[in-house]
Amino acid sequence: MTSTLATSNGLSERINSLTPSATLEMAAKARELRAAGKDIIGLSLGEPDFNTPDYIKEAAIQAINDDYNSYTPVDGYGELKEAIITKFKRDNRIAYEPAQIVVSTGAKQALYNVAQVVLNKGEEVILPCPYWVSYSDIVKLADGVPVEVETTIENDFKMTPEQLEAAITPNTRMLWYSSPCNPSGSIYSEEELRALADVLQKHPQIIVVSDEIYEHINYGVTKHASMAAFEDMYDRTVTVNGVAKAFAMTGWRIGYIGAPTFIARACNKLQGQVTSGANCIAQRAVITALNESPSRIQYMVDKFQERRQLILGLLNEIEGFRCNEPEGAFYVYPDVSAYFGKTLNGVTINNASDLAMYILEHANVATVTGDAFGNGNSIRISYAASEDEIKEAVARIKKALN
């Protein structure tokens, strides 16, 4: 019998089968090229280019001065859980109890926790494509099976009830989606979510994960809606959120869930054996962030909206780029399949990965291949950058493609 050691160079099959995060991988390549003297414009990472608001930073400084330095409760400070409960009631019309809230070291850990405590080996998770890069591998790490549902730019990259019904099998255990969507910026309306919920009523074994991390970066076309706000979906929906995106707090690493009590308790149990409680200073800062009105961060949303209009106008001038109009988040996700099969400067473009690498090497602009999001016809471009950077980046891309 061949040993695992001999077949995996001393590492587990689990880690050898894991795909590196495409967004982090592209960011690393961009850093390498910068270190080599290249002038790289980075439009690959999903990170606001704003500083954390002063009122939140002041709360963190106060926490330091108040000598917050000890271990925190595994599922979060009681005051933070109350702030999260208030936020859910105010913004989402969802009523949770403290036992249903778990605070984690970022929304990514929250998603990982949920997969680990819900999925058994071979159970399926429906992922409307495109989806956030880590969903598929988080599911696989829990021995689950990702089931991708293809969507189209013509339908604004949203899954229909008919597609959902067709994807469900006796092994289906979960449905995961984000709204606003990373990478497409699409938002499911309340009516669209209701139609999906109606399908799910026929399949009571399915747990829904609603990733709402971009909730507040919404440009007002479609009002934000939450699956858990439906009475008949409340007991089977996990609502995932955090402060990284809307509050420009990516490095503070605070995410959280509102969930059925049995799932929240299981996540608390798992987290207690992995990371324990999240950072004490960051938690104190997030109490202030969530208790304040979301209107205090509207200036960032307004600026993102201006940049969205700018980049859409510029990209639409590039022959072969087809863009939907994102209603939220801070990405554009153009269909670039018109370039597949073409040769540019001696480089044959077979897919989105080839094009993203070509743009990095020939235009000095970092983007992310759509292959990483389960949709191979597109690339993701972040507009969390200055207007000058956006103009220069698109000009470089246009020149390299022509």
Image (cartoon, rainbow, N blue to C red):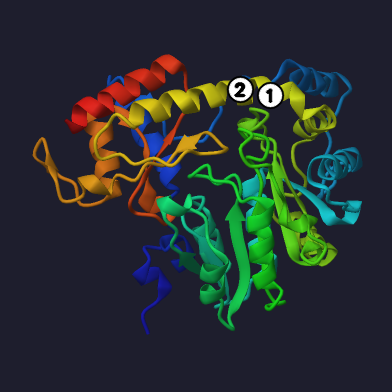
| Residue 244 visible in the shown view | yes
Q: Amino acid at mark 2?
A: Asp
Residue on which the image places disc 2: 302
Q: State whether residue 166 is above or below residue 301.
A: below
Label 1: element kind: helix
Q: Position of residue 177 (x, y in %)?
A: 59, 56
Label pair 1/2, CB-CB below 8 angstroms? yes
Q: Quadrant of residue 379?
A: top left
Q: Position of residue 255 (x, y in %)?
A: 70, 43
Residue on which the image places disc 1: 298
Measured in 3D between alpha carbons, the distance from the residue under mark 1 to the one under mark 2, in whole angstroms, is 6 Å
Q: Looking at the rendering, in which quadrant would you find the C terminus?
A: top left
Task: Looking at the picture, tell me which residue is in the foreground, 123 or 95.
Answer: 95
| Residue 141 visible in the shown view | no
Q: Looking at the rendering, in which quadrant would you find the N terminus?
A: bottom left
Q: Position of residue 133 (x, y in %)?
A: 48, 51
Residue closest to the far left: 346
Crowding around mark 2 (Cα neighbors within 10 Å: few <14, some 14 to 19, many 20+) is: some
Task: Looking at the picture, tell me which residue is in the foreground, 108 or 146.
Answer: 146
